Amino acid sequence: MIRAENISKSFAGRRVLTDISAIFEPGKTNLIIGKSGSGKTVFLKCLVGLLDVDEGEIYYDDVAFTRLDFRGKKELRQQMGMLFQGSALFDSMSVEENVRFPLDMFTNMSYQEKLDRVNFCLDRVNIVDSNRLYPSELSGGMKKRVAIARAIVLKPRFLFCDEPNSGLDPKTSIVIDELIREITVELNMTTIINTHDMNSVMENGEKIIFIEEGEKCWEGNKNEILKSDCSKLNDFVFANSLARQLKDSSK
Amino acid sequence: MFRFLSGFGSYWILLGRVFARPEKHSIYYRQTMKELVNLGLRSIGIVTIISFFMGAVITLQTAYNTENPIYPTYLIGLGARDSILLEFSSTIVALILAGKVGSNIASEIGTMRVTEQIDALELMGVNSASYIILPKVVATVVFNPFLTLISMITGITGGWVVGTAAGVITSQNYIYGIQYAFIPYYITYALIKTVVFAFIISTVSAYQGYNVEGGSLEVGRASTKAVVYSSVTLLLFNVILTQLLLS
């Protein structure tokens, strides 16, 4: 479980996050939604420690992550996996080397053991016969899947995904969403996904937090989101005219 | 002034992270070998070509500026040798490498920054500064002295080939000149300078790349800054080291 308490963050005097609190439960896909520039990515980066918070605390189970020193954070980070918006695969490494990298760095497994684990993870994300390919030779969807394989290779307890569907077609987006959901249940991970893709919200939203201009405006799940009275949330969810017509006709 | 001091401070903080204890020596060793090939071996060609022609030009200019019956012609060889050993092979080659290697380091690290590869390393619990920068610093500091030695040999050879072909000096006089009043310490002096310059080029360029914020435009700017700042720092240290080592 991850618990964020009263998180605030500013950049050069400009407040980006204001007093955000949330609890993210294990075995569930937790979604952070909001418009572009609402502060979702900053919040996610604060949660993983890539940005330091100005105020507030973040707890991983009962460990106060924000109070840990460099070594403590480093140890805890080995239990985290992250899927970045642009996949963030290492250009100079092949698919196999990318997925093997955390094993090379943090385990004493034999080469064969590492290879077996890499192949297992690549099979799990439906990447076959691509071990020798380089990131530049992969499609957007394949890059995301390889990045997921790399994120789960050390069997993390916490998985973070920043806009996992950005740049993907709707069908591939659904494949990635399903994959993240299945892996979350399989490994009983606490998964947090940043997204503004409503298909993803309706598929994966076991717990949803809506952020607007750096403040948490709403919290609920995919069933509650359609019935909410929060005007800011409704503006976001029913942004297009078709969605608004459907909402009006359902009343 | 504040920006300069702030940048200077963060440069030293970055160096503190770079020289932290490596997570896994075998991986750092493998990375260093890759960088030796990328930054070292792949620079041999340009260093050889430039040194050959610069050696030739230094010899011809020395010859045309000392056309006087009072001066013995072997002084052309001596002048070419000392110019190459004292300044050209260490400083000028370092400036050339600041352009080639420095921009390579800054753009590579800058691209890793803007494509979140550095964030990915940090999130895995890897000391990204050490993992990315340390192998580059070790590779340049270890290999650049060899480039300097190659430059010395090809520069002097270039002077000999072109000087004799142009008829400004005989082969015998040139070889006598490059041996005349030879001070072996000049080579030590050049190699000491090379090691310091290699450290400056790799760390200043890495600092520029590591602190890129934005996109591809900023990567290009960081690459330019890397060349400019490392060249200016290098010239400053050239003066300091010359005073310290030759006075």
Image (tube, coloured by chain):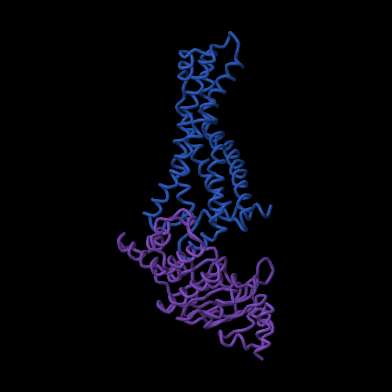
Chain colours: A purple, B blue
Q: Is residue A189 left or right of residue B107?
A: left
Residue at the limit of the structure toward the bottom, as seen here: A251
The location of residue A39, given as percent across then percent down, is 63, 72
Q: Residue at x 57, y 65 (%)?
A: A167
Residue sitting nearer the eye, B226 or B42? B42
Q: Residue furthest top?
A: B69
State whether residue B11 is above or below residue B172. below
Viewer-nearest residue: A139 or A210: A139
| Foreground residue among B48 and A62 | B48
Q: How many marks?
A: 0
Estimate the x, y position of residue A180 in percent, counting from the top left. Answer: 47, 74
How far across and down, in percent of the image, does residue A80 sit? 46, 71
Classify the position of the C terminus of chain A by image quarter.
bottom right
Residue B114 horizontal side relative to residue A72, left or right: right
Q: Position of residue B51 (x, y in %)?
A: 52, 29
